Amino acid sequence: MNNSESVSFLEATYQKIFPQDGSFRDKATARLEQLTMPHWALGDLMDLAVDLAGMTRSLDPPVGRKAVVVMVGDHGVTAEGVSKYPSEVTAQMVYNFVAGGAGINALAGQAGARVEVVDMGAAADFENLIKKGAIRSKKIAAGTNNIAHGPAMTRTHAVLAVEAGIEVANELSLEVDVFATGDMGIGNTTPSTAIAAALTGRPVTELTGRGTGLDDTELRRKIEIIERALDVNRPDAADAMDVLAKVGGFEIGGIAGLILGAAAQRKPVVVDGFISTAGALVALELEPFTRDYIVCAHRSVEPGHKAMQEKLGCRPLLDLNMRLGEGTGAALALNLVEAAKAVLTEVATFADAGVTGTSAK
C-alpha cells in the first residue's frame, strides 16, 4: 500500500483545507477601498466580500448556486423530558420539508436556494422518500443513545457521521457554490449544549437555553441532564471526535463533515444557529483552517450561542431573535452573501465613474 492509499478519508480531507488566499483578499480590499462611497461605508458587507474573494480565489466569487443542507437525527436523551415535543416530530418535519411547508422551505426559496434533506440518524425509516430521491440517506443508526446514561454513539459511528457529511458536500460539489447548514432533531439543543460546554469550558448554567420553550422547572431539569451527561461521559475537550461520540448527535457530526467538505472545496459555508454551530466547533477542532470558510449567519436567542461564536472567532451577520433552526438563519444570510458579491463586482470605483475622491492631505 502506498502513502496515498494509507491516508484516511478524513485526513485526506483535512489536507485539502488551506487558509484563504491572501493575494485575492488584498486585491478585493484594494478595489473596495476605491468604490464610490466613503471608506468602508458598507462595513461588515465589505468584510464579507473580502472573505468571499479569499475563499474562492476570485474577484468574481461564484455564489449563485446555493443549497441549504438539513441534517436529520434523533436523540435518546429526549426520554429525559428535555424537549416540549415528542421525538416523532423529527420524522413528521422531514415529510413537511419534502412537502415544502416548513420555515426553511419558505426562506430558502426566497433566497433562491435548494433544500437538501439528509437522514443522518432518524428513528424513522424514510425508505419511500429515499426511493423517490426526495431525501438523501446517510443513516448511521436509528437515533443516538441517551447521553444521560452513557455515550451517544461509538467513536466509529462519530467518524462515520463526519465522513458522511463530507460525502454530501462532495456529492453536491459540482452543483453548489455556497453551502448552508441546517438541522432537524427533537432534543438536539441538549447535546449541542453539552458540546458547547465541553469545547468552550463555560458552565452549563450559562450555556443552556429553553430550546422549544421550556418553563423554569423544565429548564432546571435540562441543565441537570446536561451536567449529568458530562459527568457520566467525561468527554475529552482535546479530542473533538471523543466529544462528538460521547455527547453529540448524528446530525451534528454530519454538519461538521459538511463544513469540512465545503472548506476542502474552497467554498463558503454559511453556518446557521445553535445546533449548526456545535457542528462547526467540532469541525474547527478537527481542522482549524476550516474557520476560513465559515460565515456565521446569525445569533440565536439560545444563550450559549454567543460563547460558541466567540470560540469560533466570528461575528454573526444577523441578530433577529431567531431560534427555529432548520437552516432558516443561514437561508436569510445567503441574501447577504449575494449582496457582498454585488458590492465587490458591480459598484463602480471613483476612477470608473469619474467621481472625485477624498482630498489628499
Image (cartoon, rainbow, N blue to C red):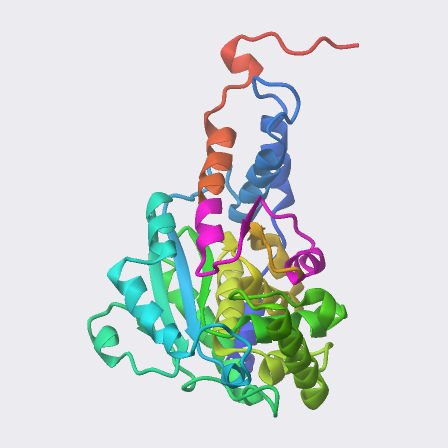
* Magenta part of the chain: 304-333
In the image, 342: left or right of 200?
Answer: left
Q: Quadrant of the C terminus?
A: top right
Vertical placement of residue 109 versus 344, above or below: below
Q: At 43% across and 50% down in the image, what residue appears? A: 331
In the image, 69: left or right of 6?
Answer: left
Nearest the viewer among 80 and 173 is 80
Q: At 25% across and 67% down in the image, what residue appears? A: 134
Percent position of residue 47, x then y = 62, 38
Percent position of residue 15, x then y = 58, 67
Q: At 72% across and 86% down in the image, what residue appears? A: 231
Instruction: Tell me, yes or no, whether the highlighted magenta stretch contains residue 319.
Output: yes
Percent position of residue 300, x then y = 58, 55
Percent position of residue 19, x then y = 63, 54
Q: Quadrant of residue 310?
A: bottom right
Q: Quadrant of residue 282?
A: bottom right
Vertical placement of residue 245 versus 116, above or below: below
In the image, 322: left or right of 174?
Answer: right
Q: Quadrant of residue 197?
A: bottom right
Vertical placement of residue 59 versus 75, above or below: above
